[in-house]
Amino acid sequence: MIVAIASGKGGTGKTTVALSLALAAGRPVRLLDCDVEEPNCHLFLDGEVVAREEVFLPTPAVDTGACTACGLCGEICEFGGIIVLPTGAHVFPTLCHACGACVHLCPAGALREVPRRIGELTEMRAGSITLFTGRLDVGQTLAPPLVRAVRARGEGNGLVIIDAPPGTSCPVVAAVHGADVAVLVTEPTPFGLHDLELAVEAVRRLQVPFGVVINRAGAGDARVADFCAREGISVLLEIPQERRIAEAYARGLPVVTAAPELRPAFCSLLDGLDRLRTPAVARAHMGS
């Protein structure tokens, strides 16, 4: 089962839920930290990094001697990654999405792809958890290719938990797409409700079954719960607003360590996720 932990905004507790599920699973887990601009799962695990891998993106380079400045590459680039001056084409690497169209269509063959490093992927072992972390290099702006590199480590059998980036933009889509089930973590505040509505729309478009976890329950009002009731969305778990949990998180301790009485609740959450995805899995088998 591939479980994606997502939210419409940062700071709602995605990492809290992802780590707690991984620690409560009681079996081997691959935990994928896809929040590549600010990964933090490793801060809560006592493990050893066993592998590092550089991640590259193919980026066009111009042979100035062969370029005829015809302008075709600049016309076909949808992202403004190439401009053509009278002296020839000029590439803006950070705007390039590595689609390869310019290299393929250049009539003079003046463009070729060269690898450009965008980040690093590390593998850490911590007990029954294998953590894969993507970290985008400073100055790089294109996160989805690195997210997909981390997601590739989730292929195969077993339990996979994805700590997705915050928001509803392209990196989130890259992390959540293809998951068996999603958990949307929110908080009972006006901001939490607003961004939960965006996240719900996103996962519905991706056709991923989902439920909601309300973090810091009791700190706000009932509008999030009322929204879930109106929309027929399952509230899978409510994590109480408690100072000891916040203090433990600030010290780098997972929730199930600070509040061990919550461990059975996360075990039940895993069981509930398996039931939540069953209808979608059945439809997929019927379609095949």
Image (tube, rainbow, N blue to C red):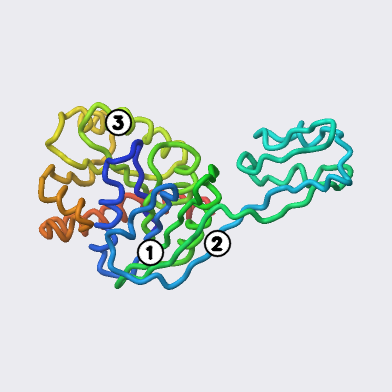
Q: As shown in the figure, which amino acid type bears the numbered disc 2?
A: Glu
Q: As shown in the figure, which amino acid type bears the numbered disc 3?
A: Glu
Q: Residue 278's x, y, as percent?
A: 36, 53
Q: CA distance from mark 3 to mark 2?
A: 43 Å
Q: As shown in the figure, which amino acid type bears the numbered disc 1?
A: Leu
Q: Residue 99's x, y, as percent?
A: 68, 45
Q: Residue 150's x, y, as percent?
A: 48, 57
Q: Quadrant of residue 193?
A: top left
Tell me, yes or no, if residue 282 can be seen here: no
The label on residue 231 is 3
- Image label count: 3
Label 3's element?
helix
Residue at image point 40% right, 70% down: 49
N-terminal of the two: label 3 or label 2? 2
Q: CA distance from mark 1 to mark 3?
A: 34 Å
N-terminal of the two: label 1 or label 3? 1
Q: Is residue 45 above or below residue 86?
A: below
Question: In this orientation, which residue lies closer to the viewer: 33 or 240?
Answer: 33
Q: Is residue 263 above or below residue 243?
A: below
Tell me, yes or no, if residue 190 can be seen here: yes
The label on residue 43 is none
Residue at image point 29% right, 70% down: 27
Q: Which residue is mark 2?
A: 54
Q: Which residue is mark 1?
A: 131
